[in-house]
Image (tube, grey):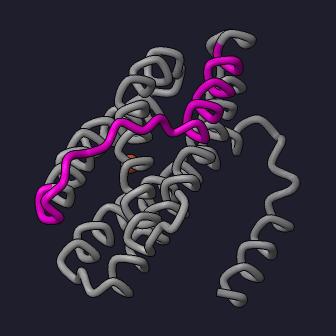
C-alpha cells in the first residue's frame, strides 16, 4: 500500500472482516457438531445465524461506500480456525473438548472484537457515522457472544472440580475493566 490513504487502511480492515466472517460461517458447523454440551451447541448455532446476518450487514456497509467486498484472505482468522480444528481432531467429544472449543471460539470472538472496534473508530474518524453505527451493532453482538461463552464455560467446568483459578480470573477481569 504505497502512498495509501487512511481510507485504504479502513477498507482493508473491512475486506479482512468480510473474509473472516465468511470463514466463520464455514467453520462453525464443525464446532457445533463436535460439541457434547447442548448449551454450547445451541449458543454456537445462534451465533452462526447471527454471523450470517453480520455478513449481510457488511454487504450493506460496502454498498453504502459504493464498493464491492474485495477479495482478501484473512490469514489471522485462517490460523485461529485451524487451531480450533486441531483441538477437535485431537480430542474425543467430551466436556474437556467443549472447553477447548470455547477457548478457540473466544479467540475468534476477540479477533472480531478488535477488528470491529478499530473499524468502527476509523469510520467515525472518517466521518462515516452510518457505517460506524452498523459496525457498532456487530461489535456489540460479538461482545455478547463472547460473554455468553464465558458463562457456558463456567457451567461446563464448574462441575469438574477444576474451578480453582476462578477467583484469580475475576480479579484479572476487574483489573482489565479498571484500565479500560
Ligand atoms: Fe462475527
Residue 119 image-quadrant placement: bottom left
| Image point (35%, 30%), residue name | 25
Q: In this image, 135 relative to 97: left or right?
A: left
| Image point (31%, 43%), residue name | 70
Residue 108, x across and y down, in percent? 55, 44
Quadrant (top left, top right, bottom left, bottom right) of the C terminus: bottom right
Front-most of residues 42 and 146: 146
Front-most of residues 155 and 40: 40
| Image point (53%, 16%), residue name | 34
Front-most of residues 130 and 40: 130
Residue 139, x across and y down, in percent? 39, 65
Front-most of residues 168 and 73: 73
Q: From which residue to which does the magenta span run? A: 63-88
Q: In this image, 47 relative to 108: left or right?
A: left
Q: Is residue 50 above or below residue 148?
A: above
Residue 122, x across and y down, in percent? 41, 77
The total of numbered circles placed on residues is 0
| Image point (33%, 83%), residue name | 126
Which secondary structure class fits the magenta region best? helix
Residue 10 image-quadrant placement: bottom left
**In magenta stretch: residue 77:** yes
**In magenta stretch: residue 140:** no
Q: Is residue 93 above or below residue 121?
A: above
Residue 88 image-quadrant placement: top right
Q: In this image, 142 relative to 3: left or right?
A: left
Q: Is residue 48 above or below residue 10?
A: above
Amino acid at each position: 500500500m504505497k502512498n495509501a490513504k487512511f481510507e485504504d487502511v479502513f477498507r482493508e480492515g473491512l475486506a479482512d472482516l468480510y473474509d473472516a466472517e465468511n470463514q466463520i460461517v464455514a467453520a462453525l458447523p464443525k464446532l457445533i457438531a463436535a460439541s457434547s454440551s447442548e448449551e454450547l451447541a445451541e449458543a454456537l448455532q445462534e451465533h452462526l445465524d447471527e454471523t450470517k446476518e453480520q455478513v449481510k450487514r457488511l454487504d450493506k456497509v460496502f454498498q453504502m461506500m459504493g464498493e464491492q467486498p474485495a477479495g482478501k484472505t484473512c490469514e489471522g482468522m485462517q490460523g485461529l480456525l485451524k487451531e480450533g480444528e486441531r483441538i477437535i481432531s485431537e480430542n474425543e467429544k467430551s466436556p474437556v473438548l467443549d472447553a477447548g472449543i470455547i477457548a478457540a471460539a473466544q479467540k475468534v470472538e476477540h479477533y472480531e472484537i478488535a477488528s470491529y472496534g478499530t473499524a468502527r473508530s476509523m469510520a467515525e474518524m472518517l466521518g462515516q457515522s452510518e457505517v460506524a453505527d452498523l459496525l457498532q451493532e456487530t461489535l456489540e453482538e460479538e461482545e455478547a457472544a463472547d460473554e455468553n461463552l464465558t458463562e457456558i464455560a463456567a457451567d461446563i467446568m464448574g462441575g469438574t472440580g477444576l474451578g480453582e483459578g476462578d477467583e484469580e480470573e475475576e480479579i484479572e477481569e476487574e483489573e482489565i475493566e479498571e484500565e479500560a
